[in-house]
Image (tube, rainbow, N blue to C red):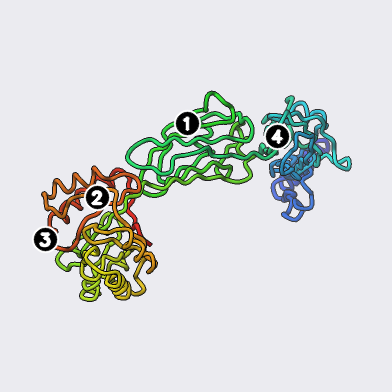
Amino acid sequence: MTMLGGTLALAAIWMALAWITLVSTQFVSPEPPRTMTHHALSDSNRAGISVLRGGEQAAAGTATTLRPTVGLTARFEDVPQEHAEAPFSLNLRFSEPVALSGEQLRTDALLALSGYVTAVEPVDNRSDLWNVSVAPDGRSSVRISLNSRSRCGRPGAICTQHSIPLANRPTAIVPGPPLSVEFLEAIEHHSGLDRIPVQFVFSEPLLVRSRTLANLGLQAGAASIDRLRRIDDRQDGWEAVLIPESSDDLVLTVGAAFDCPDDDPGCLELRRLGSSTSLSIPPATIHLTFDDGPEPATTPAILDILARYDARATFFVVGRSVAAFPELIERMVNEGHTLGNHTWKHDDLLQLSADEVIETLWRTQLALGEHATPCFRPPFYRFNAEIVNLAASLGLRMILNTGDTDDWTRPGATAIAANIVAAAEPNAILVLHDGGGDRTQTVQALESALRFLKSRRYAFEPVCQ
């Protein structure tokens, strides 16, 4: 019995100890995990950080290392404005120190187009700032770029000591010595639907493709570039063929102010043009003139047509009609037309004395007042040297015409329109009539003639200012 009692007592003690162990395991709280605060991360200064994740990991001695998440970047600084066919240098700055030598940067990462990277040295023994020495290959612009493999550990990869790879690929361009461009002799005006050749020459041969030059180095106003080719296979001379698109001034601009991709060697050469150079070719101009008005039955309709086709003309007016219809005179002037002297009452000047010639011309000038111009046209085209001299004494010069439309004979609107078109040429002075009889045919002819001539890119401006 004594032995049995002792055995039972030992069993009871063992069970009690087991119960205590079980209870302590289930109800003792584990150590809370240790985490890094925002301030702790900031203070770490991007170094690797070991973070314990709980009591069990602490007991096992395991940890997770956080790596910087901000990418490594680079940029070129202190880039020269140009090189003069002489060696130059610029700085390459990284956002963090890099695990490379200057020689590795020179041979594996830096690339120079139209030049050579001759040396890469740390600035003040820093590994985040490097001085890059470059020798240009001639006069061309030099493009320096930084390349890197995307995976650290491979040859040519640029990374931090924490294996963070370079996130960008910076580029620097150093233009060569300045270029200039000169336009060769061009036509005086453009007209019709003809293609307009324009030639220009650079101050030295320019190694650029025609497509690059046309798309990125040229701009055309009021025209499109139909073709671009070299002049006699020269490297410095080009000819652009333009197609006018309106009756405005045709403008061709050669310059470096346009977008230029960094990977196009020819376009880089265009950056050597310090400023743009333009050539303007005005449209061929026709001077429409109208005699014998103003006339309320005709002049307003003619003014409407001129406005519709953006045409301005010179009206050789009769003085007494100026006094009778001042509202028409004001409309003419307000719409951009000019006024010439056609005597006071459409006088045959050869039938007048010298004093009478002076009187009829001067009286009309006074009626025109501030709208008067120094131009006169003799009625019936009857004049002699004395009349020309008398008019000159009043400050007037005689304006005749280069082509006659014969509208005064009233041959029909179709015939008058055909005469207008046939007489049209650059700087032509055409005579029509808005007074002195029924001018219905002239009105009808003017509409169709201007429609046709405007489609041929002619402009219409006054002959007298």
> Which residue appears at 69% of the width and 47% of the height?
26
Tell me the kind of residue under disc 2. Answer: Leu
Q: Position of residue 36 (x, y in %)?
A: 74, 51
Which secondary structure, mark 3?
loop
Tell me the kind of residue under disc 4. Answer: Ile
Where 316 sits versus 187, above or below? below
Image quarter of the C terminus = bottom left
Is residue 12 visible in the rendered image? The answer is no
In front of the other: label 1 or label 2? 2
Q: Nearer the viewer, residue 409 or 459?
A: 409
In front of the other: label 3 or label 2? 3
Quadrant of the rendered image containing residue 235: top right
Residue under label 2 = 450
Mark 3 or 1, nearer chain start: 1
Mark 3 or 2, nearer chain start: 3
Residue under label 4 = 144
Where 116 sits versus 444, above or below? above
In 3D space, how far apart are the residues under numbered discs 3 and 1 (Cα atoms)? 53 Å
Q: Which mark is residue 438?
A: 3
Where 388 sits versus 90, above or below? below
Residue under label 1 = 228
Mark 1, residues whose alpha carbon is within 10 Å: few (<14), some, or many (≥20)? some
In 3D space, how far apart are the residues under numbered discs 1 and 4 (Cα atoms)? 30 Å
Q: Position of residue 408 (x, y in %)?
A: 15, 55
Q: Nearer the viewer, residue 131 or 442?
A: 442
Relative to 258, 111 lies left or right: right
In 3D space, how far apart are the residues under numbered discs 3 and 4 (Cα atoms)? 77 Å
In 3D space, how far apart are the residues under numbered discs 3 and 2 (Cα atoms)? 20 Å
Quadrant of the rendered image containing residue 157: top right
